[in-house]
Image (spheres, rainbow, N blue to C red):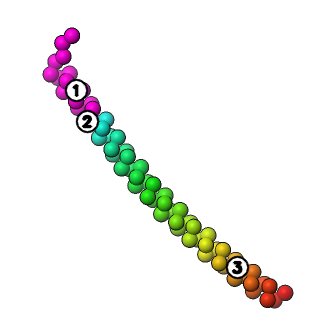
Amino acid sequence: MEVAIKDLLYVVTLAIGVAGSHFMLRARVMVLEEKVKGYSRAIERIFDSLQRIEEKLDGKEDRRG
């Protein structure tokens, strides 16, 4: 079996391309994970605010009745 230099170059280029794609996709996934964490925190703050508002309204309703 004979391996030409162009075949070896092709395999090396393919390996570098696959590795590069892997690391680029990994970086994108990390960015998306951070965005999701940020959205989760924002939604959590909204629910906390709504909970406080609900408690205040319940307190006012109790005083009237």
Amino acid bearing label 2: Ile
Amino acid bearing label 3: Glu
- Overall secondary structure of the magenta stretch? helix
Judged left or right of residue 44, residue 8 is left
> CA separation, marks 2 and 3?
58 Å
Secondary-structure class at tag 2: helix
Which mark, residue 32?
A: none
Q: Is residue 34 above or below residue 63?
A: above
Q: Residue furthest right?
A: 65
Amino acid bearing label 1: Tyr
Judged left or right of residue 65, residue 30 is left
The quadrant of the picture occupied by the N terminus is: top left
Residue depicted at x 48% and y 60%: 37
Secondary-structure class at tag 1: helix
Judged left or right of residue 63, residue 19 is left
- The residue under label 3 is 55
Image spot of residue 60 (x, y percent): 75, 86
- The residue under label 2 is 16
> CA separation, marks 3 and 1?
67 Å
Reading the chain from its start, which is encountered first: label 3 or label 1? 1
Q: Are marks 3 and 1 in contact (CB under 8 Å)?
A: no
Q: Residues within 10 Å of mark 2 (few under 14, many from 20)?
A: few
Q: Residues within 10 Å of mark 3 (few under 14, many from 20)?
A: few
Residue depicted at x 61% and y 70%: 47
- Give the residues in magenta: 1-17
Quarter of the image where one finds residue 18: top left
Secondary-structure class at tag 3: helix
Q: Are marks 2 and 3 in contact (CB under 8 Å)?
A: no
Q: Residues within 10 Å of mark 1 (few under 14, many from 20)?
A: few
